[in-house]
Amino acid sequence: MSGFIVTFINLLFQALLFSILGRVLISWIDPQGNMRITQILGEITEPILAPIRKVLPTMGMLDLSPLVAMLLIQVLHSLVMGAIRG
């Protein structure tokens, strides 16, 4: 059972990281957000990115919230895995 939980948590965190990376990359192709994949990635990642945007200072046109979110997700992943492994 423990192996299943570890695998599930690893996949969940990787899916979040890839969703954020995908949103960043697709925003260069579809900046208006008209494509369905852009909308889906936005729905997945916006609950994570919006609170970070509120805390981060504005950097002009540069949005650093995906970078901060990816770093926080990796730290959280390490903490969760450390707690599971004991």
Image (cartoon, rainbow, N blue to C red):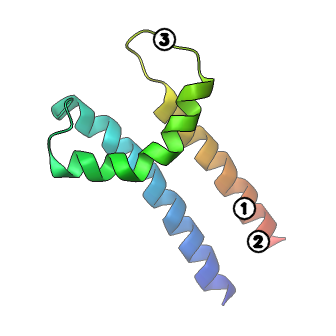
Q: Nearer the viewer, mark 2 or mark 3?
A: 3
The percent coordinates of residue 36 (x first, y second) are 17, 51
The percent coordinates of residue 29 (x first, y second) are 16, 33
Mark identifier at residue 80: 1
Q: Nearer the viewer, residue 60 or 83?
A: 60
Q: Amino acid at mark 3?
A: Met
Element under label 3? Answer: loop
Number of numbered discs overlaid on the protein picture: 3
Q: Amino acid at mark 1?
A: Val
Earlier-in-chain disc, 2 versus 3? 3
Determine the CA span between mark 3 and mark 1. Answer: 31 Å
Label 2 Cα crowd, 10 Å radius (few <14 / some 14-19 / many 20+) = few
Tell me if residue 44 comes above or below residue 49 in the rendering: below
Mark 3 sits on what residue? 59
Q: Nearer the viewer, residue 55 or 2?
A: 55
Mark 2 sits on what residue? 84
Q: Nearer the viewer, mark 3 or mark 1?
A: 3
Residue at image position (50%, 38%) is 49
**Quadrant hosting residue 78:** bottom right
The percent coordinates of residue 67 (x first, y second) are 50, 32
Q: Nearer the viewer, residue 43 or 7?
A: 43
Element under label 2? Answer: helix
Mark identifier at residue 69: none
Earlier-in-chain disc, 3 versus 1? 3
Q: Are marks 1 and 2 in contact (CB under 8 Å)?
A: yes
Q: Nearer the viewer, residue 76 or 55?
A: 55
Tell me if residue 82 comes above or below residue 1 in the rendering: above
Element under label 1? Answer: helix
Label 1 Cα crowd, 10 Å radius (few <14 / some 14-19 / many 20+) = some
User: Which quadrant is the N terminus positioned in?
Assistant: bottom right
